[in-house]
Structures are given as C-alpha cells and as structure tokens.
Image (tube, helix red, strand yellow):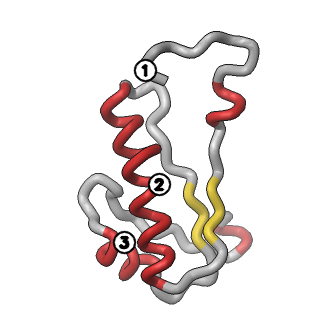
C-alpha cells in the first residue's frame, strides 16, 4: 500500500479511544481496517475484531473520513469446516 501512497499510522486499538484514534486518522482520505487477532485466542480476537472494529468505525466518523473499508477473512476462515464454540 505504501507504493500507492498510503502512510501507515501506528497505534493500538487496545489503548486508544475513538477521539484519540480519530486524531491519528485526521488528514487522510480513506481508512482501511485490516486488524485482526485470529488464532491468538478469544480475548485478543474479541478485542481487535469486535471492539477494535467498532472503535475504528466510530473514529472514522468523528474524523469525517469516507470511505471506511473493512478487510476481513472471516467468511473464508472456516470454509468447509465446522466452527468452534468460541468463533
């Protein structure tokens, strides 16, 4: 993405609130959310894929950035397999 002009901005979804994340996002034209913690256990996965996604969407709204693009592998993770109770 850097070759296309994207500038990654480091920050922790576990440590920021929506306004703090919005500050990091400001000045950008688009937000691409691709964080995830699949395989790290239920707690990290819920924190990133659940709370983190909601936080990023809220921060994008606060920052006035459109569009918000969600990159997710969840539909493909269990293709032709059964899911566990924690998934």
Residue for badge 1: 86
Mark nearest the camera among 3 and 2 is 2
Q: Where does residue 69 sit, x and y in percent of width and height?
A: 65, 63
Q: Residues within 10 Å of mark 1 (few under 14, many from 20)?
A: few
Location of residue 2 (image quadrant): bottom right
CA–CA distance between discs 1 and 3? 28 Å
* Mark found first going from the N terminus, 3 or 2: 3
The image quadrant that residue 66 belongs to is: bottom right
Q: Is residue 52 above or below residue 25?
A: above
How many numbered badges does the structure rendering display? 3
Q: Is residue 82 above or below residue 71?
A: above
Label drawn at residue 58: none
Residue appearing at x 57%, y 15% in the figure: 83
Residue located beneath label 2 in the image: 53
The earlier-in-sequence mark between 1 and 3 is 3
Left or right: residue 2 versus residue 58 is right
**At 52% across and 86% down in the image, what residue appears?**
64
3D distance between C-alphas at marks 3 and 2: 12 Å
* Residue that carries the numbered disc 3 in the rendered image: 21
* Disc nearest the viewer among 1 and 3: 1
């Amino acid at each position: 993405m850097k070759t296309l002009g994207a500038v990654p901005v480091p920050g922790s979804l576990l440590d920021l609130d929506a306004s703090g994340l919005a500050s990091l996002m400001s000045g950008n034209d688009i937000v691409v959310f691709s964080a995830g913690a699949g395989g790290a256990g239920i707690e990290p996965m819920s924190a990133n894929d659940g709370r983190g996604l909601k936080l990023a969407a809220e921060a994008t709204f606060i920052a006035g950035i459109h569009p918000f693009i969600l990159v997710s592998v969840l539909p493909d993770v269990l293709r032709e397999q059964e899911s566990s109770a924690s998934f």
